[in-house]
Image: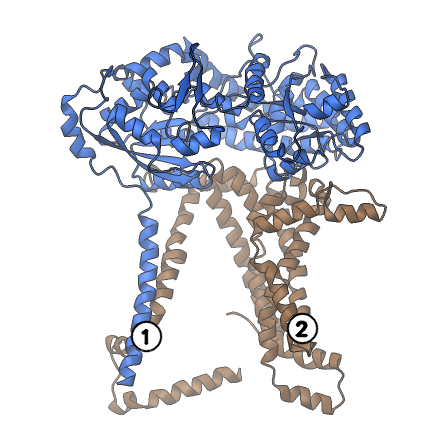
Amino acid sequence: MAFRSAFARAGAKKQVSPIANRGRKKSFFQRVYRDRYLLLLFLPCLIYYILFKYVPMWGVLISFKDFKPFIGFAGSNWVGFKHYINFFSNPDAWRIIRNTLLLGVYSLLWCFPFPIIFALALNEISRAKFKKFVQTVSYMPHFLSAVVVCGMLNSFLSPIRGIVNTLIKMCGGQAINFLSISGWFRTIYVASEVWQTLGWGAIVYLAAISNVDPQYYEAARLDGASRLRQVWSITLPCIAPTVATMLILRVGSVLEVGLEKVMLLYSPAIYETSDVIATYVYRQGLMSGNMSYASAIGLFSSVVNLVLLVAANYASKKFSDTGLF
Amino acid sequence: MKKRFHTMISLLCMAALLAGMLAGCSSASSSTPAPAPSAAASTSASGGSDASEPAASGPVFENPVTISMLAASHASWPFQDDWYVLDVIKDYTNVDLEVTTVDTSGFNEKVNLTMSGGDLPDLIFLTSNAVVRQYAPQGAFVNVLDYIDQMPHFKAWFEKNQQYALNYMSADGGLYLLPQQGVEETERRGWLYRKDIFEDLDIEMPADKDEFYNVLVELKKAYPDSYPLAFRSFSGTMAQMIMLSPSWGAYYIDEGDCRFFGYDYDTGEWTFGPTTPEFKEMLEFYNKLYEEELLLPNFLTIDTKGWQDVMANSDSFVTLDYLSRIDFFNNAMRDSEPGFTMAYMVPPAFNADVGNRFAYSAKVMIGMVVSSQSKHLDEVLAYVDWMYSDEAYDVLTWGRPGELYDEAADGTRTWKEFATAAEMKQATGFETFGFYERYDFNGELATFSPECREATETARKYDLPQLPILAFNDAEQEIVSTVGNNIVTFVNEQVSKFLIGERSFDEWDAYVAEVEALGLDQLKTVHESSYARVVAAQG
């Protein structure tokens, strides 16, 4: 808040200078000329958004058509809500929506708090070298592609010679056929997700923590506050706006379950828990080249995401005064 | 001065950024292949030569012709623009091929992009029939049957192989995908076993279901930590079932052939395999193997690499795969383990009525399509026609006479240099996507080890008849892509569960009822109406 008003003041001060003195408003082109370098810097970003975000939005129209690529958009027939009706009348529709939501929610529940706790813990380490080392190691999984991660999971969890089952057998247990039993899928997916996002997700919080004014801690120490007390009463409240913003952003992508990863881990035996919207679209839409059907489902999940995002933003504003818009 | 300098620097940076972006855009948009530049010129130039006359001597065209082609490039033998095969084609036809290749993994995407770009090359060599099903009704490709009279070589081949060619026919009776012949032998699959281990333990070849089971038990007794039988998963597509179930007297869903039901040529009846008692019997058999740890526990999920390791480590001794895997394993393993011998096993009789027979596996639907937009269609068709000639059959398999092969007195040919099929393909481009329509499989057989060659020849004797490959029209496709897809998902899931004991066989009747409730009757009708067209086309 303070930051915002200071910014406003600076802006106001600037406007008093030469422009106001001359007593007339500059025309649009003069202002463009004045800010030409700033605008030029902004241009690539603008082009990117127009080209890759706004132009493709017209594509959702094909979900109301029987799109035939070779004939083209104009030549394809309008079919109204046919593809949407097809999707919802499918016996698996609710199962895949439920699976997608559950995977998204579980990922959120586990992947969201861990980086915060990790950042707080890292912040308490006083030996800089050790801290750097831990941090670097924790980033590493982020740079692995889904193919590599799933390859590792496949061999670790293999019922023959897999390290996990070898350990289980050593402790006298029975080997578990992890990837063929539907009950295990969510655990495996979420756990590997946590492992992959932990270090990378902590960066933002570490940055927020380093912005906390050290004077607060000094004052707290003088008052005899313990380390834990300091974390609870100073660090956490200070990074709360960052946490809220990150949470809203995460909620907005709950339905965006990683297609690659699920594809590489699932098999018909575990469709029960692992068949999600993205894999369904892949199987029914893209494999058989039915782009209209695929984009209908794509639009549906975007709408759900939007609703979730707006709801999360509303809740956040109500409870913590922090919001995206 | 200093300020000017800074301005300059920042301008330069921005210019560089912008240039980068523009370059990114333009390279993306230019990825659709341009039409052959000399197309128009060569049409007029070669107008004098009669393209439809088979050229007994001399090239097909008097003057050079450029034909553009899009083809997939296989990672193991990537396309080279100086391949021997291009030289041969140039020699015999005077055609300069302007080839655009994309790696097999990105090929379908490339085809879809090309289609929506609307700017097609003269020829596309397709690796599946799906593209034809999707785009032929939209008018993208030429129906070669409309031009058959100007294609004498093709006509002769077609009349001799009509039954085979009908598999490639579309629902409207058109033939858009030009059928290849010869390469389908590489798809041959069968039972493979570790001959050296079997001989060590003095185990006889199993002749039927019970002996097959006993063999696995014996192997397990000798190697308690092993899982004697292993399959790989083919990315969860249940492709194993398509190969396994026919020997039991039931046919699994084969989406590649557009066929969800099995067909009985004697009764003329379409039957849905996965709900039959024979299929249940098979599931119970493999479930028993799974429970007794005779079958690799993760056979439903293991990837190809994992399965290779299992076989190489002697964790399993019996498997089902491509016959070329015999050489694959033996060549790789004999350096470290000289006795390692993978060999072909005659299919056991799992069902007494079926006998020692195995699913028809030597089939693949690939070949060229001709663009309907081609600016010099007559020349393109003349080139394609040449590919069906006996001359092309010979030189696109073996090269120019005597150059790369030795010929024995009895006519058997052997390669001078190539020890494996991969070497042959990498060096020459023979038998790679885009460079065959009629292929002499002896060319690849000549690269096999004697045991692998023998296996391929033996296996032919145990083939079950090939079932019809169907083509659906729009109305039928609508049912297939809704009802059919739902049934595939459901059956794949339930069959997996029965196999690993996640669903009890007590619920079999409930399962059958569940499948029927998904619209099995509708799907059956679709098969009947589609097949009626095939029968009508046969005359």
Estimate the spatial distance between the alpha carbons at disc 1 and disc 2, rounded to whole Å.
40 Å
Q: Which mark is residue B250?
A: none
Q: Is residue B68 above or below residue A47?
A: above
The kind of residue on which mark 2 rests is: Phe
The residue located at (28%, 90%) in the rendering is A18
Q: Can residue B109 be seen by looking at this rendering?
A: yes
The residue located at (72%, 44%) in the rendering is A178
Q: Is residue A150 above or below residue B268?
A: below
Instruction: Please name the residue that numbered disc 1 is placed on.
Output: B10
Q: Supply the letter of whichever chain is brown.
A: A
Instruction: Please name the residue that numbered disc 2 is placed on.
Output: A130
Q: Quadrant of residue B4?
A: bottom left
Task: Please tell me whether mark 1 sits on a helix, a strand or a loop.
Answer: helix
Q: Is residue A24 above or below residue B179?
A: below
Q: Which tag is nearer the camera, tag 1 or tag 2?
A: 2
In the drawing, does residue A108 fall left or right of residue A2?
right
The residue located at (53%, 82%) in the rendering is A1
To the question of a shared chain for discs 1 and 2, the answer is no
Residue B479: x and y in percent read 51, 28
Residue B271: x and y in percent read 60, 17
Q: Chain of mark 2?
A: A
The residue located at (67%, 41%) in the rendering is A272
In the drawing, does residue B93 fall left or right of residue B176?
left
Task: Give chain B's shade.
Answer: blue
